[in-house]
Image (cartoon, rainbow, N blue to C red):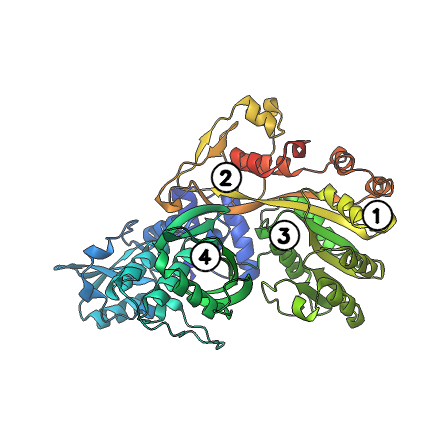
Amino acid sequence: MYDNAAAPDVAQLIGEILVSNEGLSQQHLNHALAKQAEEGGLIGKILVGMQAINEVQLTRALSVQYGEEFVLKLPSADEVPEGLIQNIPIGFAKQHCVVPFAANEDLGVLVAMSDPLAVDVLDDVGVMIGKPVDVVLAPPSVILDLINKLYGKLREGADLNKGGGDEEDEFGDSEELVDILDLTDEAPIIRWVNSLLFQAVKERASDIHIEPGERDVKVRYRVDGALRESKSAPKQFLSPIMARVKIMSGLNIAEKRLPQDGRIRRKIAGKDIDMRVATVPTASGERVTIRLLDRSSVLLGLGDIGMRGETLTLIRDIIQRPHGIMLVTGPTGSGKTTTLYACLSEINAPDLNILTIEDPVEYQLDGISQTQVQSKINLTFASGLRSFLRHDPDVIMVGEIRDVETAEIAITASLTGHFVLSTIHTNDAAGAVTRLIDMGIEPFLVASSMVGLMAQRLVRRPCIDCAEPVSPTIEVVRQLGLDPDRFYSGGYPALDVPGARDLPVGTFLAARGCPMCTGMGYRGRTGIYEMLMVDDPIRQLTLAKADASRLRASAVERGMSTLRMDGALKAMAGLTTAEEVLLSTAENESA
């Protein structure tokens, strides 16, 4: 069913409008319809989740479907009369994504919404305001941005230069989380830190860095893997800022000489967010790094993380095996844990006993027993894994193989009838074999236990609103490992991956920059993968202690697609740019 299933009087289906007006391909629509039939939900939201369209395109299509006016830009907070929002609670406005923004003598009050079917919400707004209302449709992010600015202005903002106040912690540790935007703290430090967290979630940041300098405190966000400076505060507020963060994360506010690690769980702008906090003393004072994890979006399926059909088939075959080890390799922040969670979600069933040991447990999976490493009480990967073997598991996930003891127990488990999933830090898939042997694992154990090795990276996706096709030079095409004759003549097949675009033959997308991507030219990330199947030739080379380059060359001869080649094919499909692929992969990965 389409989005208008609840409104049969609407003649044209939203999917048809998106295909005819917004450039959505029929292939992506069919893929979304299949996913809707399997999982339920609205087709528009599914397409946005697949990144086949963005929220602007969806809202614009809804305006056509329901005959409502569409606006991309709303007035600034200073241009909206304060009286319009005084009787509307911020929780109501955020929950229903609705905000009044202008008064008109003829039409009454103009209200921006994102859902044209929420007629009851519009009626409630009219009652709260006490005036007739008329609706326009606007993208959710535009509406939420105006709501945040309007209510921030109403409460006189979060300005650290306006004086201090009581810094009592008002969050608590109850299970029922309260959205930080609904709190009415008067303490400037509390409002400033809350504003910092909200802005990070709004900008889809993965990390917040609070860094002391000589005269001020700088805040930088990491968005799509790139750092950008966001805001600052006078140096005199470093101590209360650090105290506030430490209180929220349960750390010792008196300890400023030693590094500390903590955790925060909060609801921010309607999202359940986990944050890992790490402090460290520097010459200019303590600095803190906060890693954000959106619990509502971390759990993705194997079909949602950007794998091509061939790689997807291989990994699904591997995770169905009764025993053996599969390793996912890559640097920190390359999405290894997300891939492991996707594998577990794929095979999770009542007839399987699945145990995991992680550091930390990033997402709680129903039906799976998860244990978190606690080094202070000697609960390590190795000790936890050793205990797991007494619980008759079918599948074991180990967060990371860091030492020879963990590796030996994992191999023993795989050889005694268990399937083991884990990660290891190497640059490519073949390097995992040599890394294990260098640790001290016997080559015959590695050869007999390994069934698959996957290397991966995350590359940024070009903004769907401003990216433009460009024709690359022959040198760039060759650096990507592509055949220039095939590339410029359209000899490479089209990719069947969610979000792929039909680009003109012989072109890649180039990042430009627009308001929707805050001038960065990129919005979101996708994965590129290298799947090395451990077959008989690879086992023979492993027994001979061959180096990683020989292992890789042997796998490529039999059809393995390297990281750079996978990235190049995805650049041809508009899923990333040539620059991103070249930055994320090494030259020898084009072999």
- Give the labeled residue for mark 4: 285
Q: Position of residue 381 (x, y in %)?
A: 71, 63
Tell me how far mark 3 sits from mark 4, CA to CA.
33 Å
- Give the residue pinned by disc 2: 501
The structure residue drawn at horizontal position 33% and vertical position 60%, both measured from the top left corner, is 116
Label whose residue precedes the other's in the sequence (4 or 2): 4
Q: Is residue 575 visible?
A: yes
Kindly report the distance in space between the C-alpha atoms of the residues bearing marks 2 and 3: 26 Å
Quadrant in the rendering for residue 496:
top right
Amino acid type, label 2: Arg
Mark 1: amino acid: Ala
Q: Position of residue 543 (x, y in %)?
A: 87, 43
Most foreground residue, 285 or 489 = 285
Label 3: few (<14), some (14–19) or many (≥20) C-alpha neighbours in 10 Å: many
Q: Is residue 211 left or right of residue 351?
A: left
User: Sequence order check: which comes first, mark 3 or mark 4?
Assistant: 4
Q: In what element is the residue under mark 1? A: helix
Numbered mark located on residue 90 in the image: none
Please count the marks in the image. 4
Mark 4–mark 2 distance (CA, rounded to whole Å):
48 Å
Q: Earlier in the sequence, mark 1 or mark 3?
A: 3
The amino acid marked with disc number 3 is Lys
**Residue 447: mark:** 1
On the image, numbered disc 3 is attached to which residue?
Answer: 336
- Note whether residue 368 is visible: no
586 to the left or right of 51:
right
Give the alpha-carbon distance from disc 1 to disc 3, as whole Å.
Answer: 23 Å
